[in-house]
Amino acid sequence: MDLVVGKGLLRERRPLRHLDPILVFSMLALGVIGLMMVYSATHNALTAQHLDPGIYLKKQITFLALGVVVIMVVASFDYRFVKVYAGIAYVASLALLVLVRTPLGATVRGSQRWFQFLGFQLAPSEVAKLALIAMLATFLSELRSSELSLEELYRATAIAAVPGLLVFLQPDLGTSMVLAAILVGVLVVAGARARHLGILALTAIVLIFGALQLGVVKDYQVARITGFLDPTNDPLQGGYNRTQAEIAIGSGGVFGVGYLKGTQTNLDFVPEQHTDFVFTVVGEEFGFVGSMVVLLLFAILIWREFRIALISKDPFGTYLAAGIASMFAFQVFVNVGMTLGIMPITGIPLPFVSYGGSSFLTNSAAVGLLLNVHMRRFK
Amino acid sequence: MTELRTGFRLRVLAALVVFMFAALTTRLWFLQVLASERYRHEATNNYVRLVDVPAPRGRILDDQGNVLVGNRESLVVTVNRQEAGDRLEQVLYELSKILRVPVKVLVQRVDDPAYYSYSPVPVAVGVSDRVDYYISEYRDRFPGVEVVKTPVRDYPDGSLGAHVLGYLGQIQPNQLKDPAFAGYQAGDRIGVAGVEAVYEHYLRGTEGVVKYRVNSAGANLGEIGSLAPRSGDDVVLTLDAKVQRLAEESLSLGLTYARGIVDSSTGKHYLANAGAVIVMDPATGAIKALASNPTFDPSFFTQPHSQAEYNHQFGPATGDPLFDRAIQGQYPPGSTFKPFVLLSALHRGLVSTAQGYSCPAYWAVPEDPLHEVFNNWTTANLGTMSLAQALWDSCDTIFYPIGYDYWRLYYPPTNPPHLPLEQDLGATGFGAPTNIDIPFEQEGRIPDPQWKADIHQRYPTTFPDGKWFPGDFINMSIGQGDTLVTPLQIAQAYSAIMNGGRMCVPHVGLRVQTASGHLVRRIPNDCRRRLPFTQAQLEYVRQALTQVPRVGTASYAFQGFPFSRVWIAGKTGTAQVTGKQDFSWFAAMTSAQGKQYVVVALVEQGGHGSTTAAPIVRRVVEGLYGLPTTQFINVPGTDF
């Protein structure tokens, strides 16, 4: 291992030449599309309130710039340092998840998810995603055998279950699902047997039913999930978002109605449109073609992530990349799927496109880590 | 080995991701390419709001063109419960201060179950501009509150003709499902009584529509297009406002007058709690006046009101002013019935105008072993008289044997039953609605053996006898027993006597015309039905009734009447109702100055026909022909 700091710094300069330009391009392209979409979704409502129509745009530009800085910082040190600090990061993320439940956290629409400072919000659940990926990668890369025993699988599950439960209690069903997806992704790559994954899935199903029976899951959460099965059931509640999202996307047609010309977007029919439902802006204003471009950019992003997992010089890098790829893939699928009415409505943002600092910076850090693994893939 | 396996597993995961992207792409293809047209349509619906522009409702005019019901713009305060949300109570409290209406009343009004929780509920109508300015100035204190200009019904003459005119109310959910109300929406106000209800489809007009662009909050972003409303057509009535006022005043004065008279049989003043007056043109069936007392002010229904306010106005303690005694009240006709029984008896050959009949103090069925006695209205034996005199002196003991003859000759009925008296009375319009163009008319009742058996089976306590007795015919012969009529049926039947046997359907509608006066529809007279009696028989009865105000039972009430200038004939009636004071009837036919009228008055618990009803009719007739008005005078009530 080459962890001597003094020597390392000299060598650090060289890996920059081994950046993955395609990964960086797709991420920046998505970020720029996000800027356009956030502006389109917000300028009208802001103008109507006699506010600067560019408030959200300017903030998101700041996030994009900060994201680039985060990428550079995260990519600058050898990713294997992460292994050293993964435990600390993991425990710290748990601490934040607990603290956000105290009066220090801000309550927005019934859930305590954020810390509020300096006009920005920090969502510890975002941090928890990365911390979990690092912790799982660290734990699994220390194992000797190429196949996971059931006990190891349970221990990995326990690692994911603690933040998963804390996030679920906020309540933030979406992020806890993302944490579960990360776990499954990493476990598959780490060599969990199909039979064991089956047992895990069964346990999860039992737990979910138990939670439904005991009323741990709030009614509105159940309603949003059942609302996706029958959206017309209650058009003013859970089904409304979904119906409006479908109308916006469907009315875009093949080529879209044109940038800033979407009636559903401009007239504010789709709720949370600059955050969770940002894809509806793409769908309405740029149509099928524009939607496919965005999906293609995500496909490229995730493809590069898998490639990095494959070419990493050590299992730790592979697991990191696999966890991150799972996170992105799942978030894209659930977010876009929910705007298309094939997935339940959960508050998962679309990476790099949705408005929001915590998510943007977390995703940037993830990309930074991947670049790090990529740059240092040579043994 | 390990790396190969890892590679394989990564490919498994990647395949899963590819599958997920394929699912998204497929769905996108469906939404944006295949089903796009539908969603585009829905998107348009989403941002275009159609706002109905109410059409001004047609006016209701009297036959001289006087406006009986018009419209005026009124400022209405509405509260949207959903928009007010948690602040509803606070909003009502604020409103209560500026509207000067107790919060409790506002709460009751706003809780009207007839409105959906998301639609605005009117809580005050006719508020001042000041209220409008105040609410718009302090918008933030009144979430969910709107002040809107709404046309409301205007009644220049107050309660005049209220029962005929009717009023508006909220359309009912079951009506919305009725194809007759296609195009109506929840919350629409429609005619629910009187002419407003019957001529609803003419009066309503066609709503206009304005297309607005809106955002998701429903905020108006500008007009796209509009279609102007077409105002409703005016309905011109046969009613004459002057005659209607005359009828209502005469009825009201008559009731007051009767309340000052002591009922000799009970020793108490007459209650004279209610009554009706009808003035009808016998040649056409046109109603010139239709009064029912107690009455109400229809403008009450232009105001939002709670159930409690409604009960205060129209509850049991108020004497049921919404009840239209003229067409809904069902009363025993008493002696006003005798002309029709006599006509039937003449028609069936039971009696002869050439013969004299004795009028003893009492009469009993000859075959009755119990010898049950039916009394005349007087204990004196009036001797032998003609049938005509039997009418003008209202001799019951001449009519009892006529009733008994129907038993003797036609009972038990053959199969199919031949019931000549019921048949003849039915031909005279009794026991069936007249089909006047006012809703909720009652049909009265002409009892027959079948009816008596049926009603006994259904209500054995109230109707202890299911068997048909001679007494049923005997009672019917003097308009008592189970016989019930409405004042309108009496007016129609006397019109037929007067006009030579034509049964005219009474009507209050004359024509429908556009707001600018162009004829839309003439409401035709319908006098196709004929009485089964001969002209000679009708003439005989007319002549007999001419004597009633001159020398007969109403002669006291018509003392000093200028019979030479105004021809008048009529019949008194004193109907007995179990547990109540006598009901007073008078039906008159009159002709002078080329104008003919039938005037009917009924006073509940008003004593004898000559005591209350006849003076009311006299006052109306005097008004109709511009004769000097005679004061109500106390006359001895000695007739039946």
Image (tube, rainbow, N blue to C red):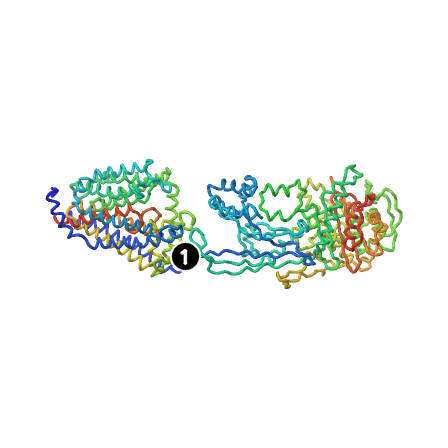
Q: Residues within 10 Å of mark 1 (few under 14, many from 20)?
A: many
Q: Quadrant of the C terminus of chain B?
A: top right
A183 shown above or below A28: above
Q: Nearer the viewer, residue B521 or A61?
A: A61
As drawn, which residue projects farthest toward the bottom? B518
- Give the residue type at disc 1: Ala
Q: Position of residue B460 (x, y in %)?
A: 68, 41
Q: Position of residue B237 (x, y in %)?
A: 68, 57
At 62% across and 51% down in the image, what residue appears? Answer: B167
Q: Is residue A194 left or right of residue B191?
A: left
Residue for badge 1: B43
Question: Image height check: is B141 above or below B529?
Answer: above
Q: Position of residue A228 (x, y in %)?
A: 37, 49
**Residue B82 appearing in the image:** no
Tell which of B366 and B237 is nearer to you: B237
Which of B591 and A205 lies nearest the eye of the viewer? B591
Instruction: Using the rendered image of the protein, determine whether residue A285 is visible from the camera's viewpoint.
Output: yes
In percent of the image, x 82 and y 59: which residue is there?
A: B536
Q: Can you name the residue that lies furthest to the left here?
A: A7
